[in-house]
Amino acid sequence: MPTRAWITDMNQVLGHTAGNALEVMEAVDFLKGQATEPRQLEVTRRLSAELLVMGGLAVDETDALQKVDQTLKSGRGLEQFSRMMSALGGPADFVDRPAHYLPAAPVQLTVPAPRSGWVTGMATRDIGLAVVELGGGRRQASDTVDPRVGFTQFAQIGQPVQAGEPLAVVHAANAAAAEQAQRSLQALIQIGDAPITLAPVMDGAAGGSKYCHALRRLRLWSFAGCCASVGACRSLLTNDFGCTETDKAQSAKSMAVRRECSVS
């Protein structure tokens, strides 16, 4: 099956959160229709539509987008997520009570805007590293990940803010870590004197085996990302791209569940 990759805008946080449990909560809210940040919605719709067309489940993009919209609106997307969660050993009522299962950080601290103006940019990669500093990621394989920590309620590029209004909220394990993250985030979100023209969140697609091989050579190929693409799953499970056998086995189980859900 052919493989395609979309080039998406990475110049700001997608959605409103960054961090393990926080992003899972946002994903559940998204499937419930309670948190549909426009850029996140567009990326989800377009990538889902691409998979439907590639898999022969839609005749063209228009048909695929209609199917995606109906799935989100009807709640079938949430239902399938719940079935996958349960089949993989998770709680059957997770989508009904995500806050019961997802751990919450004991300290939350607002990041106030240092001045009035418009949000004009953010250092997305450094924001990701700030999550790591909070304990939400690994510097080496032996590190323990704290799923509670991260950021929520990000202001979006182009949004007007007044001095003191929230740019985001820090979720941390302790007050010292929260204060450090607060200072870091204030420096990583830029505020200007005038609004700017927003870049499109989807900026073209590329596909074909030559493109995929080039990505592999550059070691830009994400195991988790490939498994989301039906066309790449088989090659991933038969080749070693830095993944453990446990990773591959878990991915195979996940794909099997996905196939079961898609045909029932």
Image: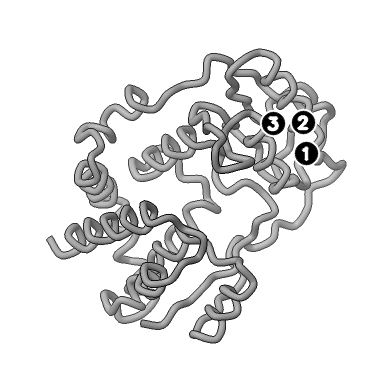
Could you tell which of marks 3 and 1 lies nearer the N-terminus? 3
State the residue in front, 249 or 147.
Answer: 249
**Residues at marks 2 and 3, CA–CA distance in whole angstroms:** 12 Å
- Left or right: 27 in relation to 40: left
Name the residue located 43 percent from the left edge and 55 percent from the top edge: 244
Mark 1 closeness class: few <14, some 14–19, many ≥20 residues within 10 Å? some
User: What residue does disc 1 label?
Assistant: 188
User: In the orientation shown, which residue stands out farthest toward the left?
Assistant: 264
Give the residue type that dot 3 points to: Leu
Residue 79, position as x, y percentages in the image: 22, 46
**Residues at marks 3 and 1, CA–CA distance in whole angstroms:** 10 Å
**Viewer-nearest of discs 2 and 3:** 2
Name the residue located 69 percent from the left edge and 47 percent from the top edge: 124
- Left or right: 94 in relation to 136: left
**Does 195 appear above or below 23?**
below
**Viewer-nearest of discs 3 and 1:** 1
Which secondary structure lies at badge 1?
Answer: helix
Residue 196, position as x, y percentages in the image: 78, 53
User: What residue does disc 2 label?
Assistant: 184
Give the residue type that dot 1 points to: Leu
Q: Quadrant of residue 32?
A: top left
Could you tell which of marks 2 and 3 lies nearer the N-terminus? 3
**Residues at marks 2 and 1, CA–CA distance in whole angstroms:** 6 Å
